[in-house]
Amino acid sequence: MAFFEALWTEARQSFTPWVLLLTVFAFVLTKTVAIDKPRFKAMFLFIAAHLAGLVATAGFEAVHSTFADITRTPTWVFGAVAIVGAGATLLFSVLLPRARLHAPLIVQDVVVGIAMVATSVAVLSRAGVNLSGLIATSAVFTAMLGFSLQDVIGNIAGGLALQVDNSLDEGDWIRVGDVTGRVVEVRWRYTAVETRNWETVLIPNTVMTRSNVFILGKRQGQPRQLRRWVYFNVDWRFQPGDVISVVQTAVRAAQIDRVAKEPLATVVLMDMTDTFGKYAVRYHLSDIAVDDPTDSEVRACVYFALQRADMTLAMPAHALFVTEETTDRKAIKTEKQLQRRRALLSTLDLFAGLAEAEREELARHMKYAPFAKGEVMTRQGAEAHWLYLMEDGQATVRVSDGTYDREVAQLNGPCFFGEMSLLTGEPRSATVIANGEVECFRLDKAAMQGVLAARHEIAETLARVLAERQVTLQAAKEGLSADAARERANRETNALLTRIRAFFALG
Ligand code: CMP
């Protein structure tokens, strides 16, 4: 009986009813809102320690043991700390989020830490412990404490400074020394940075405040984007102005994800060696996480643009060619290339009616024109010079009415495109973009003229394909039904045939 009486007396003195109330409150909270789990666990530990201390003190008190005086004070401190922890959870997980305010973790930690120390000091002085005397009389202890806490205090102050002056946000990409990565969290001791190699680096906040921290791609009033350099070498057979123009036009026109449209990419001659010029494409990367894959797409675009312009990348100056370029060798090479072109022509229905000699003639006029992923092969509204014969790869046909831009068709090689403008003389009706690498050849108007003059039925086939594709474009713009589109295609075929004949001056 004496035990329960002592328990009740101790509980009233030790704020136990409050602690129990908080335990219930804590249980309810865990079920309803997202809370900071580690702090919550610590709170439960303090509650448990408080209850254990309470039982022990009541036990000692019941048998009149002086141990009760020893266990009472920590019991009070545990209870007080648990109350502060619960109050912090209520404030930071319930009240502030309701008011749409968010205190950074480090600020929460520091506020809770200070509140816990202050409460503990208050409780200890209530229990009669003379703290000021204890610290003042132990100068050596104070000095040691200050010295050992130097780093901790520096880290906390650094972390707070980083949060308070808003210089760094979670999600920022930074470079500190040889670490480059994305900031995931600023804690009271360190800033956690995730690197591209799937590592997390914990940089002490003192290092963060004492070093040069580069925030990648950040510029006031501008979107986040980082300038990248992609180098390539071209030998002096090709004039720098031409190289720059060919590559710059291709990279600017290409629709490569993550290459910013503003500022536009530029190409510069960076350096000159005996045998080649060193060039660089400078572009702005809009998603800093994906740097190497985007560089790779830009490189592919440079490669194909140079190929189309018959410009070759420079070879190392020490490369030695031992193969003699004999007439026979040249003939074999040409024959191989012609074979490839003939094969492509024979797979296209459009040229099925041609005799072998006619196909041969056409093959000689075909010019190799490969494209990299994202490159624009024809642009809506541009002047047309070529009919494209796509050997392999995929492309998307898109049409824009000035406000909306929509996809109207997918092209899969082998197929042809670019016939509409070449046959009628009108600007390109749509934009065709390479979905991946595209192996392609092109034919100019003169070559087509020869074929059409010799084979009138090709003009008819072209007129039909043309009418069908044009009507698909109109259907996309006007929302025509399938039947209406078919009927319009039939009507337009004859009109187009007349126009093709007139444009190519066919009899
Ligand atoms: P041209 O207008 O010269 O340039 C864009 C090309 O996109 C066009 O020729 C056609 O070859 C192609 N094109 C346009 N509309 C379609 C379509 N509906 N289906 C397939 N190809 C199309």
Image (spheres, rainbow, N blue to C red):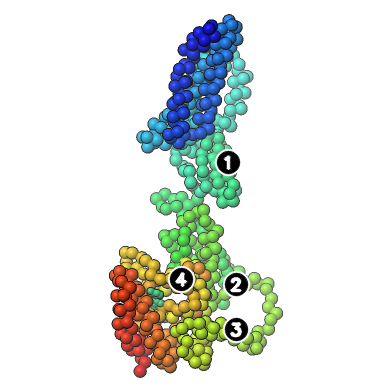
> On the image, which quarter does residue 150 sit in?
top right
Q: Amino acid at mark 3?
A: Lys
The crowd level at tag 3 (other Cα within 10 Å; few <14, some 14-19, many 20+) is few
Residues at marks 3 and 2, CA–CA distance in whole angstroms: 24 Å
Residues at marks 2 and 4, CA–CA distance in whole angstroms: 30 Å
Numbered mark located on residue 395 in the image: 4
Disc 2: which residue: 314
How far across and how far down the image is residue 159, in percent? 51, 36
Which element carries disc 4, helix, strand or loop? strand
Q: Amino acid at mark 1?
A: Leu
Whether residue 64 sits left or right of residue 171 in the image: it is: right
Residue at image x 53%, y 6%? 2
For marks 2 and 4 on the same chain, the one whose residue lies earlier in the sequence: 2
Which element carries disc 1, helix, strand or loop? strand
Q: Amino acid at mark 4?
A: Ala
Disc 3: which residue: 336
How far across and how far down the image is residue 101, in percent? 39, 36
Which element carries disc 3, helix, strand or loop? helix
User: Is the residue indicated by label 4 positioned so its CB lies within 8 Å of ligand 1?
Assistant: no
For marks 3 and 1 on the same chain, the one whose residue lies earlier in the sequence: 1
Residue 193 shows in this picture:
yes
The quarter in which the C terminus is drawn is bottom left
For marks 4 and 1 on the same chain, the one whose residue lies earlier in the sequence: 1
How far across and how far down the image is residue 317, in percent? 65, 72
Say which of marks 3 and 2 sits in front.
3
Residue 133 shows in this picture:
no
Say which of marks 4 and 3 sits in front.
4
Disc 1: which residue: 202
For marks 2 and 1 on the same chain, the one whose residue lies earlier in the sequence: 1
Q: Amino acid at mark 2?
A: Ala
Residues at marks 3 and 1, CA–CA distance in whole angstroms: 59 Å
